[in-house]
Image (spheres, rainbow, N blue to C red):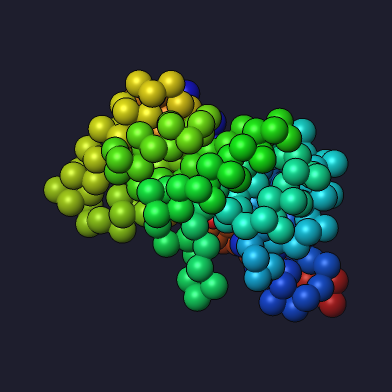
Amino acid sequence: MAHLGVNIDHVATVRQARRTYEPDPVWAAALAELGGADGITLHLREDRRHIQDRDLRVLRETVTVKLNLEMACERAVCDIACQVKPEQVTLVPENRQEVTTEGGLDVIAARDRTAETIKRLHDAGMIVSLFLDADLKQIELGKQLGADAVELHTGCYALAKPGRAREAELVKLTVAAKEIAAAGMTLHAGHGLNYQNARAVADIPHMDELNIGHSIVARAIMVGFQQAVREMKQLIQ
Ligand code: PXP
């Protein structure tokens, strides 16, 4: 059975639009736990465009399920991870221009830096997951570098047209999943998963964790909007 990691970055994105105190991702994380989240995922980006250092520190105190920090292989953010010690770190590529993470980490190109980051995180007692495309060479090297888990990038699957193209992407993910499990690593997946396409990925054999953010935050706005307006209307009348 796949566990659900809820990515709360977008809650912080709304807060940062006004640089105010609301909505607080810490509050959202508590509600996610009440909704059954098995983990809380957040990405501390170098440009701090959404999640702030304070969010990570407070979430470390309040989250009672698995805390999964997404980060790039950067020394400064690795220092923070080693101080705060979330249960798990997922290493992702990061590019200042991107709207969101655009693809898996290229561990072949960044072998030394990845190896060094994995070692530091392991020495500090964290589980390390690598966000990778469904590429067997990358997965093999991830294993050699000592990763505990691989999060398969599902962005191409999510963007593929329903039908043949999406089926072909699902086959690629399934083949890669088999390799990850055979190598003794835990299987995670995420990016672009929503209420229409997540089930098929959850059903891939050995799937242990799905990390989902955008579609859950988008749905939360829609299911909560009517009540929020009703409350304001009552207040001003
Ligand atoms: N997994 C990783 C590694 C990510 O970078 C992201 C986006 O921050 C997600 C999962 C969640 O993706 P989405 O917001 O599209 O559900």
Does residue 236 show up? Answer: yes
Where residue 192 sits: x, y (%)? Answer: 42, 54
In the image, is residue 78 above or below residue 1? below
Quarter of the rendering occupied by the C terminus: bottom right
Which residue: 54% across, 72% down?
A: 96
Q: Residue at x 24, y 40 (%)?
A: 172
Residue 210 seen:
no
Q: Image height check: is 128 above or below 12?
A: above
Q: Quadrant of residue 125?
A: top right
Q: Residue furthest front?
A: 112
Residue 42: percent from the left, percent from the top? Answer: 64, 51
Q: Classify 13 as above or below 175.
A: below
- Residue at 31%, 26% in the rendered image: 178
Which of 42/216 is in front? 42
Q: Nearer the viewer, residue 91 or 30?
A: 91
Q: Is residue 202 left or right of residue 99?
A: left
Residue 62 in percent (x, y) is at: 83, 41
Report the number of numbered marks.
0
**Position in image of residue 123 (x %, y %):** 70, 33
Front residue of this view, candidates 62 and 228: 62
Depicted 164 relative to depicted 186: above or below: below
**Farthest residue toward the left?**
164
Residue at the location (54% across, 51% down)?
A: 113
